[in-house]
Image: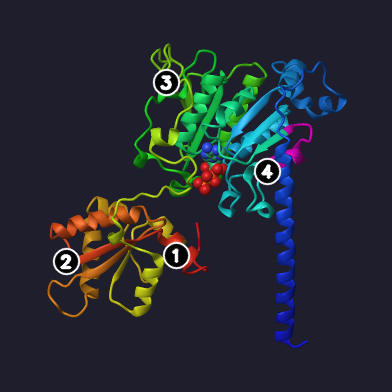
């Protein structure tokens, strides 16, 4: 066969197999959905003895006097609701299943993405695009078929939270946003369930147990949500997978101790983990507030509320989109590409941190990180001034050079536009018109150049 014929034949074969794979994936999704219908609601029956298989399987933990057969039987009849099957939820659920917890509920509205795999260890490449709750349940069943895994491929919302939380003995918050944290807390207080909560970002993590045996709840410690702009998620700030792994395992430990009635270690105190420094420390949390809106003497939270409105942020949006500029101050990636193709003189300013520029960048962009602009860094401003003068069209005095600011997602670029506008008004920069590129480089990768890396 000539070379081009072989290529054509291979291409046809690939297309055929891709079609088959896509139909298989659809079948899998349907089968997984059907499974979700069979959600158990009845409490787990009491268990009087361990089987021969169970004795062998759990033998290494059974011989621990603190746990013993009695503790193992308690685990076998315990149920745990895991909110979020991501970086924390995966290792947590894995150890709960391995240890023989009777029933594990897995709530997550999201699907598996390639960028999850470096830390969300229950999901594999083959299940990219599938619901995380199903992927996690399938993985746990492979690990321990005796454990009942109940996937809920949906968001935990004020409409569903209380009913779901009431079906389980212990709740683990493995979510990644503030509205969900308040929602889970209030549902646990209303349902009378202990809540094991953790978070991880960059090289750091935190863990505590709320609402356990008269201890404080999340609202006792944080009566008011933090300002939206101070909250960073893993997509923006980054995280090392093993850090979520450590925190998820510690969460599992607290859950297991509660379920086996050994008592948790971190009710009323907060464990802090610094992975770069290589140390743990713990701090005392404030006691339960008598005036707490959720668990206080006269609670005002008697029903679940609109937590997104309360926190001013979304519980399910992956990318927080700020709206700091008017539509006139923004261009779409498509319009920017048109301008680029037309050869119009302009300056593209990339304001991402250096570490992200090292991952990928547009070669014609000038790079000055937002942080440098925020602190009016002299070197950065000089560089910018020179670049503007260099690119200015013609020699016309006072002519404004169009400057387009870009970042990863289109939030930092808006902040940078505000700073450049202020600098122009203060005559610290030559005349320029400045706009940001909506959606940033990730929109560029999605709509303009599919070879551009997404991260
Ligand atoms: N209200 C909610 N209901 C159900 N699942 C939730 C809710 N809020 C957050 N989650 C889930 O909690 C998990 C948090 O895990 P993590 O932050 O590691 O994952 P991620 O959001 O996929 O990460 P990345 O930010 O890197 O994309 C996510 O899978 C998210 O879908």
Pointer 4 with pointer 1, Cβ within 8 A: no
Residue 430: give its label.
Answer: 2
Residue 316: give its label.
Answer: none
Query: Going from the N terminus, do you reach mark 2 or mark 3 first?
Result: 3
Q: Which residue is mark 1?
A: 444
- Residue positioned 22% across, 77% down in the render: 393
The quadrant in which the N terminus is found is: bottom right
Pointer 2 with pointer 3, Cβ within 8 A: no
Mark 3: few/some/many CA within 10 Å (<14, 14-19, 20+): many
**Alpha carbon separation for disc pair 2 and 3:** 52 Å
Q: Which residue is mark 4?
A: 134
- Residue positioned 74% across, 57% down in the render: 24
Magenta region: which residues?
A: 137-148
Q: Circle 4 sits in a helix, a strand or a loop, which is it?
A: helix
**Which quadrant of the frame does ligand 1 lie within?**
top right
Label 1 CB less than 8 angstroms from ligand 1: no
**Is residue 453 rendered magenta in the image?**
no
Mark 1: few/some/many CA within 10 Å (<14, 14-19, 20+): many
Query: Going from the N terminus, do you reach mark 2 or mark 4 first?
Result: 4
Residue 315 pos. (x, y %):
48, 40
**Alpha carbon separation for disc pair 1 and 2:** 28 Å
Mark 2: few/some/many CA within 10 Å (<14, 14-19, 20+): many
**Alpha carbon separation for disc pair 2 and 4:** 56 Å
Q: Which residue is mark 3?
A: 220
């Amino acid at each position: 066969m000539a070379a081009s014929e072989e290529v054509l034949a291979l291409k046809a074969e690939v297309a055929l197999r891709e079609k088959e794979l896509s139909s298989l994936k659809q079948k899998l999704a349907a089968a997984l959905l059907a499974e979700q219908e069979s959600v158990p609601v009845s409490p787990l029956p009491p268990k009087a003895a361990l089987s021969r298989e169970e004795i062998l399987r759990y033998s290494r933990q059974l011989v621990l006097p603190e746990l013993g057969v009695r503790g193992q039987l308690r685990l076998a009849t315990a149920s745990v609701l895991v909110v979020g099957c991501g970086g924390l939820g995966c290792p947590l659920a894995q150890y709960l299943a391995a240890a023989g917890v009777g029933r594990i509920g897995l709530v997550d509205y999201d699907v598996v993405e390639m960028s999850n795999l470096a830390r969300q260890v229950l999901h594999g490449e083959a299940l990219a695009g599938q619901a995380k709750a199903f992927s996690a349940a399938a993985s746990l069943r492979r690990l321990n078929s005796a454990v009942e895994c109940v996937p809920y491929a949906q968001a935990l919302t004020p409409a569903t939270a209380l009913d779901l939380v009431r079906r389980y003995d212990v709740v683990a918050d493995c979510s990644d946003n503030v509205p969900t944290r308040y929602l889970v807390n209030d549902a646990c207080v209303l349902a009378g369930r202990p809540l094991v909560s953790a978070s991880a970002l960059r090289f750091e993590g935190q863990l505590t147990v709320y609402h356990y045996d008269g201890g404080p709840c999340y609202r006792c410690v944080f009566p008011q949500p933090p300002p939206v702009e101070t909250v960073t998620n893993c997509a923006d700030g980054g995280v090392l997978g093993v850090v979520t792994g450590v925190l998820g395992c510690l969460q599992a430990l607290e859950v297991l101790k509660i379920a086996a009635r050994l008592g948790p270690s971190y009710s009323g105190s907060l464990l802090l983990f610094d992975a770069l420094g290589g140390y743990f420390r713990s701090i005392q949390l404030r006691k339960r507030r008598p005036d707490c809106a959720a668990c206080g003497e006269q609670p005002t939270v008697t029903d679940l509320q609109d937590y997104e409105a309360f926190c001013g942020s979304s519980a399910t949006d992956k990318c927080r989109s700020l709206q700091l500029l008017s539509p006139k101050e923004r261009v779409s990636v498509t319009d920017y590409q048109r301008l680029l193709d037309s050869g119009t003189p302009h300056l593209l300013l990339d304001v991402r941190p250096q570490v992200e520029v090292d991952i990928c960048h547009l070669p014609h962009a000038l790079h000055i990180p937002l942080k440098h602009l925020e602190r009016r860094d002299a070197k950065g401003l000089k560089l910018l001034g020179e670049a503007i003068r260099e690119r200015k069209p013609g020699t016309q005095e006072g002519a404004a050079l169009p400057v387009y600011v870009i970042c990863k997602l289109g939030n930092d670029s808006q902040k940078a536009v505000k700073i450049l506008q202020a600098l122009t008004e203060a005559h610290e920069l030559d005349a320029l018109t400045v706009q940001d590129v909506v959606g940033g480089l990730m929109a560029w990768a999605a709509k303009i150049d599919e070879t551009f890396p997404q991260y």
